[in-house]
Image (cartoon, grey):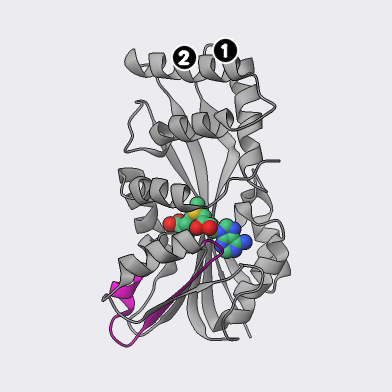
Amino acid sequence: MSQIVFDERTAQQLEVMYRKRDALRRRRLVREALAVEAGHRVLDVGCGPGFYSAELLAEVGAKGAVVGVDTSAAMLAAAARRCEGLGDAAFHEGNATSLPVEDRGFDRALCVQVLEYVADVPAALAELYRVLRPRGRALVWDVDWSTLSWHSADPERMQRMLRAWDRHLAHPALPRTLAAALRAAGFTEIRAEGHAFATTELDPETYGGMALQMVEHYLAGLDDIDREEAKAWAEEQRELGARGEYFSGVIQFCFTATRCG
Ligand SMILES: C[S@@+](CC[C@H](N)C(=O)[O-])C[C@H]1O[C@@H](n2cnc3c(N)ncnc32)[C@H](O)[C@@H]1O
């Protein structure tokens, strides 16, 4: 196991990634599903560099508020900078499994691509339930990395690279069990929607195009991988890109759920 570290360097990478076309599309989908209203109090769990928090401040307006929580000081600093002067925003260091906020204080809570990194998902879902008001809505978005379809003329080598990449997080296929876990946490009206993100070009505006650099960098940091094989794998992907034969696609899942009582 060599889980990704959300430090200053990762914060800088996300600053760039989250301005790209696919990231904008994902935020649009999240905002539609979250259906925030003016005056709402919104909790952004694992807020990262605060792109959602900033956009949601505009939606909640002057009478609403956004609170962001993250384990990473670097992410929180970026989020606070981004949201300065945009409205009633507060950011706290804290873990998704023990949120530093009051019971029943929020109309909406979102947790976008965070729980796949959290070992104790039931504890995090129990916290989402605790902090929502009755009839409040939670939104949980995660990637099912087992749906990643990535073309290579050497599929066995590709499989070895992807198995190694699976170690960057706690749960490579979390969406498969999320509906049952949300139900067990007490939520009702659980809905799941899968969104495919695909590209036929090595285009940095797409998740698939950005994935090559991310995975290549991660693999280079592992002690127990064949470095030459990893280099050859990345080189093949660049060649496929140059020849117009690149293909990568993955399904990301958006779950919404309601706190009943
Ligand atoms: C992939 S980023 C997503 C950021 C943000 N939700 C977004 O989509 O723009 C994952 C974030 O989750 C945070 N994180 C990871 N484990 C966490 C935990 N146990 N509790 C709170 N935040 C966590 C990381 O520090 C990082 O900022």
Q: Nearer the viewer, residue 184 or 113?
A: 113
In depth, the one of 201 and 227 nearer the eye is 227
Indicate the quadrant where residue 37 lies: bottom left
Magenta segment includes 70: yes
Label 2 sits on what residue type?
A: Glu
Q: Secondary structure at mark 2?
A: helix
Q: Residue at x 39, y 32 (%)?
A: 209
Q: Which mark is residue 236?
A: 2
Q: Mark 1: which secondary structure?
A: loop
How busy is the neighbourhood of tag 2: few (under 14 within 10 Å), some, or many (20 plus)? some
Regarding residue 65, the answer to whether it shows in the image is: yes
Amino acid on which disc 1 is placed: Asp
Relative height, residue 149 to residue 88 (above, below)? above
Distance in Å between CA atoms under marks 1 and 2: 9 Å
Instruction: Residue 105 in the image: state x and y as whole percent.
Output: 53, 86
- Mark 1 — residue? 154
Which range is magenta? 55-72
Image quarter (top left, top right, bottom left or bottom right) of the N terminus:
top right
Find out if the beta carbon at label 1 lies less than 8 Å from the nearest ligand 1 atom. Answer: no
Is residue 193 in view from this perspective?
A: no
Q: Do residues under tags 1 and 2 come within 8 Å of each other at their CB atoms?
A: yes
Q: Is residue 78 above or below residue 21?
A: below
Q: Position of residue 181 (x, y in %)?
A: 70, 62
